[in-house]
Amino acid sequence: MVWVETARPATVRVLGAEARTFTVHGHHYALVEVGGLEPGTSTPYTVEVDGERAWPEPDTPFPGPVIRTSDDGQVRLVFGSCRMSVPHDAHHQRVYGSDALRVLALRLARAEESEWPDGLVLLGDQVYADETSQAMQEFIAARRDPREPPGTEVAGFEEYAHLYLLAWSDPAVRWLLSTVPAAMIFDDHDVRDDWNTSAAWRERMAGEPWWQRRITGGIAAYWLYQHAGNLSPDERAMDPVLTALRAAEGEAGEVLDEFAWRADQEPASYRWSFTRDIGPARLVMIDSRCGRVLDPGRRTIVDDDEWDWIAAQVRDTEHVEHLLIGTSLPYLLPRGLHDLEAWNEATADGAWGRRFAPAAEKLRQAVDLEHWAAFGRSFRAMAELVTEVATGPDGRRPRTVSFLSGDVHYSYAADLRYPGRTERTSRVHQLVCSPVRNPLKSTLRYLNGAAAFAVARVVGSILIKLARVPASGISWSIEAGPRFDNALAVLELTDVAAHVSWQTGEVDDDGTATLREILATDL
């Protein structure tokens, strides 16, 4: 499926397949579904808009775009999260470092096609709607008074559309997205920091007069710019949103707005989680933001129906050698930080009495205690599910189970173990790659390191005992990292082996892109 945005209503044609654009708030989109390609092939293509070639552009320095179909052999996936879209001049390079996604694109443009990855997995914060660049702020100021709330944050769909334009129009990144297939999931900054951290947070945001427009625009833009590409052909054919957009005559913004508002108010009304089979691997991507159940005392990452769907996809491993579970928020945090979050959830729910609960809630929002560890029911349910799969019978037990995550602004690998078990099990890992381009300042790096890997390890173990947090039945430790570099991770999978490396990069004055390995481990 080739995603295209055009300047006017048009018919878009790719490799003999065509689609008419649909219109959302004055913007025009086409999803062109190309069929009949052979497995294991690479097919050059062009994009025609009303009969005229629009892509690739004339005199481009990049190779022609291709559609590459996978076979059942080796698979190479690149993943990461958290990318600020700011310029690449000396000032921004000094503050934000090199853009790992752009460096990857420039490096691949000069590499043999055999070195190109089979897929790109983006695990959240593809855009920052609450921390906008100078270019985005100038766009906002030309439309409204940024002295009025929400200030320089994105206010609605039109501003979201421009935010994505800034994020993905860098020539190198645009070429990469036209050549390497992508799967994406949102995290909080795609909407707003701490999005859906708790019922108290939602109640506070609902009281803001600008919030309905913001959340409606954010979810609508996410569906258009990210989620539409996650749907399989069968899912696209059945998706009620896409069906309504394609059936609309003229402007269809109201259709998408109504859907987006309902998706926020009734999270069970739409499933954002999805799955893909890629060679010997299965990717099960979990929405860990929009579908949360936030009722105090029964908080879960997703509702019961979505969890049942996720569990079914995870259990379906008969022909899967490597099971990948994508979730923007790490499932396995450094142990001390995990314990702090589990303690915080318990005390916010009253484990230390009603008087302490408000303070626990303030602490939760102040220092982002909102990962899987802060949703204890879901954490324990996932532990049981992965244990079931990892200890299953020969022929159904994958060689590896890997959680792919981002969010925390440092990269690491953790190894999960089952205390007391002697039988063969899958190798289970947590693989985190963050940020692509948004590094922590030096002081915050030290504070995060101390909180996650030193102080919290001692304090957290005491606190969870005092709060009587139930045990999960699993054990894990950090085996590689942490590293705070801007980076992307490269996961290489075959029928019999798996390897992951983290790579950071630089672009020389002459435009030469170099990737450098900073972490690596065999899975």
Image (spheres, rainbow, N blue to C red):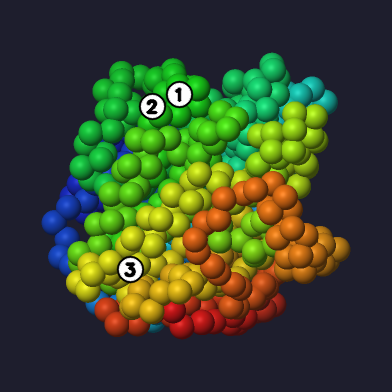
Q: Secondary structure at mark 3?
A: loop
What residue is shown with label 2? 269
User: Residue drawn at (76%, 24%), measured in percent from left and top?
Assistant: 149
Residue visible at 82% across and 26% down in the picture: 147
Residue type, numbered disc 3: Thr
Q: CA distance from mark 1 to mark 3?
A: 36 Å
Q: Which residue is mark 1?
A: 266
Q: Secondary structure at mark 2?
A: helix
In the rendered image, is residue 158 in sight? no
Q: How many badges with numbers are in the image?
A: 3
Kindly tell me whether residue 375 is visible in this rendering: yes
Instruction: Determine whether label 2 and label 1 are within 8 Å by CB.
Output: yes
Tell me the CA gap for discs 2 and 1: 6 Å
Question: Callout 1, which amino acid?
Answer: Glu
- Alpha carbon distance from label 2 to label 3: 34 Å
Which of the two marks, 2 or 3, is nearer to us in this view? 3
